[in-house]
Image (cartoon, coloured by chain):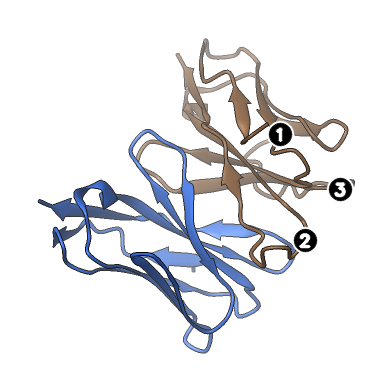
Chain colours: A blue, B brown
Amino acid sequence: QKEVEQNSGPLSVPEGAIASLNCTYSDRGSQSFFWYRQYSGKSPELIMFIYSNGDKEDGRFTAQLNKASQYVSLLIRDSQPSDSATYLCAVRGVGNQFYFGTGTSLTVIP
Amino acid sequence: GAGVSQSPSNKVTEKGKDVELRCDPISGHTALYWYRQSLGQGLEFLIYFQGNSAPDKSGLPSDRFSAERTGGSVSTLTIQRTQQEDSAVYLCASSSAGWTSGGYEQYFGPGTRLTVT
């Protein structure tokens, strides 16, 4: 079983819609959760992190964490074509080890 | 510096040669990670350094791979006797050790694209 699982997609949404990206993790001891965006040919860039149950909002992005169900999600409101990228979910486990999902490819259609 | 830097940005080498990849982390960051990303694949963890502690080498795919970190700052990833399957983008990331931001978030360098011919 992989430490972090994401749907590979591709996920397509029309411009202005809400994009919902999901991630599950296997280690209940995981402490911090991260969403990275990676454009083709570029390195990952941090969008948000969350470590408490509930929602965390930053502009058009909202991260949601449910430790009991071991899932974390990212909502992108008012999606823009510039949001088209691969979104990586990462989890920091005990001992500072990071585990990355394989990413979900998002395409926002103008 | 302002961010994580890596060199070279691109490296083409012949099968069987040794290569060295360099990473300069963000100043003050005590944690440094190396990852490998093959085309269309996710990030594969290779090795992790935290301060003066022994590195976590659990992700190194073979004994041809090694890494060191001098003075708690710059790190070098060495691949000996390169094989074609070593072709990938090698990414370095650094993070701070304290809960100043609560997240231990990692910041990535631009990567080194290694091509073994």
Which residue ends up furthest to the front in the rendered image?
A59
Can you give x and y, in whole percent of width and height, for residue A30 in the image? Answer: 62, 73
Give SS at disc 2.
Answer: loop
Q: Residue at x 49, y 62 (%)?
A: A48
Q: Is residue A47 above or below residue B79?
A: below
**Residue A93 in the figure: left or right of residue A68:** right
Do we see residue B64 in this rendering? no
Q: Nearer the viewer, mark 2 or mark 1?
A: 2
Residue under numbered circle 1 = B63
State which chain disc 2 sits on.
Answer: B
Which residue ends up furthest to the bottom in the rendered image?
A68
Q: Name the residue type under label 2.
A: Gly
Which label was assigned to residue B98? 2
Of residues A98 and A76, which is closer to you in this image?
A76
State which chain disc 1 sits on.
Answer: B
Alpha carbon distance from label 1 to label 3: 17 Å
**Residue B24 in the figure: left or right of residue B43:** right
Residue B91 lies in quadrant? top right
Residue B23 lies in quadrant? top right
Sooner in the amino-acid sequence: mark 3 or mark 2: 3
Same chain, labels 2 and 1: yes
Residue A73 lies in quadrant? bottom left
Can you give x and y, in whole percent of width and height, for residue B76 in the image? Answer: 72, 27
Q: Nearer the viewer, mark 3 or mark 2?
A: 2
**Residue A60 in the figure: left or right of residue B107:** left
Give SS at disc 1.
Answer: loop
Which label was assigned to residue B54? 3
Can you give x and y, in whole percent of width and height, for residue A72 in the image? Answer: 44, 74
Alpha carbon distance from label 2 to label 1: 32 Å
Q: Residue at x 33, y 50 (%)?
A: A86
Q: Name the residue type under label 3.
A: Ala
